Image: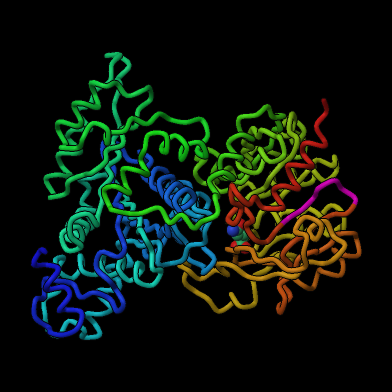
């Protein structure tokens, strides 16, 4: 048994000695939980999150293992709340209100499970924890260092999660690429973890990209080799290498990678880009990744689980069958970066196959849309979505799109800001309140139909201060929302600062707008619908965050159904 294990075990009960070893959390049994650590080389965005969530999917759905994913982000931000989606992709919101990287959305969808703040860690949060401890005098006069304090904090974070969740396996995705300054200490922590946990308890999976420069016309493995060399130079031996490439990975390339990285050829896996992410777990299963991981970590199939993987395969069958195309317009500010709307795109993608539909998305840049050209902007669409957003840019164009949809009975789904836009459109064009506006857009508006939430009035800072996370809502019987949810209570996720001004409720309702979802205790409107139209709905929450491949959001379902029905031909 390595000496580290002896010391660690004794540490958990006594002694301040051995400061370079990290104390184990209460209830933690060394070797009980296994760790799968995913790193990436050659390019950023190589798909670590996708691969790790797909591996988790097979381990959970096929083998009944309890999987806990963790994403490490090297940013000094405390969380993703203040990140601009245009630069970093969508800010995903967990039920507990954590604002995080979009990969957490991928994990929730692929694993079909809710995550919380313990599944996401940023460099900023690690350092804040350490500085707070230092200020509180917790380090007893010691100089605080990367090793053991920062690395210790990281190992502690993972072990706390393992102990609390009693996980069979913790999947750790290390953000960034190997060699970045931002993740070097994190990788060091993972090396230490592997040593302390002992052989057979930690498995490193390295995702590399195989280049194929057009001018050369052949695959080149050098960049991948250098990435692996950098990883091994940090004392980390990968057990599995996933080679991602634009065309099938050649045998010669896999052999080269195998020789350079001490990884047996059968564990150097070539992965092609699949046309639909939901097919990836099946592809990886065919390659035997699950068997390799379980062999390396000595994990046994639980055998006591419902076979959810057959449900997953059922979804793939639906994806592969013939489907009717529907074209959905999505308006918004971040139209050039599709990652900004990841969850909406995924919700459409995984809901459509259940209805025999295949969704094509058309992006609408609303800064250029006005009453004269809105018809052109909306031509060829079967439905339109106005997604979440902040600030005034492009809002008049969005409101024009809502008006067009309402007047032409085109299915409309407004998500958060899109809900607020629908209220403003209705107030202006149906209730005759020409100046209706949101105080977010015009703080001095004469008709503040959308105003700041009362609980938000006193808040100054921007980080983590919105109305965030999961809240219950009551749904009015007899409404479309009630029909779609099939119940009078539901829970959805929010991320907003503004809401419908209750002073205008009577006017809006008198003219026919129905607020079919409401917060149970407070007067916060959460769903709107227009009974005369086939589907004109807005939600103050984000149903895209809770829509899952195995359990699509009823609202997305209703919306796509309406788009299909309205389709001519
Ligand atoms: N900007 C709006 C608000 O703060 C909507 C937010 C959103 O779309 N997520 O209420």
Q: Is residue 426 above or below residue 488?
A: above
Segment tinted magenta in the rendering: 532-538
- Residue 533 magenta-highlighted: yes
Quarter of the rendering occupied by the N terminus:
bottom left
Q: Is residue 339 left or right of residue 208?
A: right
Evaluate whether residue 45 shows in this view. yes
- Where does residue 302 sit, x and y in percent of width and height? 43, 56
Q: Residue at x 23, y 31 (%)?
A: 265
Q: Quadrant of ligand 1?
A: bottom right
Q: Is residue 317 left or right of residue 436?
A: left
Of 54 and 368, which appears nearest the observer? 54
- Where does residue 90 sit, x and y in percent of width and height? 50, 50
- Where does residue 285 sit, x and y in percent of width and height? 42, 38
- Residue 425 magenta-highlighted: no
Q: Residue at x 77, y 42 (%)?
A: 561
Q: Residue at x 28, y 16 (%)?
A: 218
Quarter of the rendering occupied by the C terminus:
top right
Of 417 and 383, which appears nearest the observer? 383
**Colour scheme in use:** rainbow
Q: Is residue 469 left or right of residue 554?
A: left
Q: Is residue 441 above or below residue 463?
A: above
Q: Residue at x 72, y 65 (%)?
A: 526
- Where does residue 388 sit, x and y in percent of width and height? 61, 53
Evaluate whether residue 84 shows in this view. no
Q: Is residue 214 above or below residue 497?
A: above
For the image shown, how many numbered marks are present on the structure?
0
Instruction: Give the image quarter of residue 376.
Output: top right
């Amino acid at each position: 048994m390595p000496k580290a294990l002896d010391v660690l075990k004794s540490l958990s009960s006594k002694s301040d000695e051995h400061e370079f070893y990290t104390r184990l959390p209460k209830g933690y049994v060394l070797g009980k939980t296994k760790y799968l650590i995913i790193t990436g080389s050659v390019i950023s965005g190589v798909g670590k999150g996708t691969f790790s969530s797909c591996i988790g999917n097979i381990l959970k759905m096929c083998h009944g293992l309890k999987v806990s994913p963790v994403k490490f982000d090297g940013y000094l931000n405390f969380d993703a709340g203040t990140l601009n989606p245009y630069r970093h992709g969508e800010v995903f919101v967990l039920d507990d209100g954590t604002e995080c990287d979009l990969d957490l959305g991928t994990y929730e969808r692929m694993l079909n499970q809710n995550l919380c703040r313990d599944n996401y860690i940023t460099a900023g949060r690690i350092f804040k924890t350490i500085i707070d401890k230092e200020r509180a005098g917790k380090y007893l006069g010691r100089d605080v260092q990367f090793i053991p304090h920062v690395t210790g904090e990281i190992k502690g974070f993972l072990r706390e999660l393992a102990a609390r969740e009693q996980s069979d396996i913790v999947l750790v995705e290390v953000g960034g690429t190997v060699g970045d300054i931002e993740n070097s200490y994190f990788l060091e922590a993972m090396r230490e973890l592997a040593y302390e946990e002992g052989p057979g308890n930690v498995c490193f999976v390295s995702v590399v990209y195989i280049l194929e420069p057009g001018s050369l016309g052949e695959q080149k493995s050098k960049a991948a080799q250098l990435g692996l060399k950098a990883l091994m130079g940090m004392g980390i031996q990968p057990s599995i290498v996933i080679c991602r490439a634009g065309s099938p990975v050649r045998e010669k390339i896999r052999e080269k990678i195998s020789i350079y990285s001490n990884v047996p050829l059968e564990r150097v896996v070539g992965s092609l880009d699949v046309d639909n992410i939901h097919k990836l777990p099946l592809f990886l299963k065919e390659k035997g990744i699950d068997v390799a991981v379980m062999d390396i970590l000595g994990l046994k199939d639980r055998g006591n689980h419902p076979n959810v993987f057959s449900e997953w395969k059922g979804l793939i069958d639906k994806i592969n069958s013939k489907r009717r195309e529907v074209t959905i317009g999505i308006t918004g500010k971040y139209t050039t970066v599709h990652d900004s709307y990841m969850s909406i795109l995924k919700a459409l993608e995984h809901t459509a196959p259940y209805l025999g539909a295949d969704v094509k998305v058309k992006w609408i840049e609303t800064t250029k849309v006005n009453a004269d050209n809105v018809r052109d902007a909306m031509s060829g669409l079967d439905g339109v979505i106005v997604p979440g957003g902040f600030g005034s840019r492009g809002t008049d164009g969005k409101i024009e799109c809502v008006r067009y949809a309402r007047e032409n009975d085109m299915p409309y789904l407004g998500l958060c800001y899109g809900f607020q836009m629908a209220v403003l459109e209705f107030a202006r064009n149906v209730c005759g309140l020409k100046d209706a506006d949101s105080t977010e857009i015009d703080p001095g508006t004469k008709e503040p139909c959308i105003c700041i939430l009362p609980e938000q009035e006193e808040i100054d800072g921007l980080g983590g201060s919105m109305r965030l996370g999961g809240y219950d809502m009551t749904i009015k019987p007899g409404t479309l929302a009630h029909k779609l949810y099939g119940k009078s209570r539901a829970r959805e996720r929010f991320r907003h600062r503004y809401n419908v001004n209750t002073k205008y409720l009577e006017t809006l309702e008198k003219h026919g707008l129905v607020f079919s979802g409401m917060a149970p205790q407070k007067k916060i409107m959460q769903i709107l619908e227009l009974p005369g139209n086939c589907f004109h709905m807005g939600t103050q929450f984000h149903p895209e965050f809770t829509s899952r491949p195995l359990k699509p959001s009823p609202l997305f379902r209703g919306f796509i159904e309406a788009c299909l029905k309205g389709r001519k031909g």
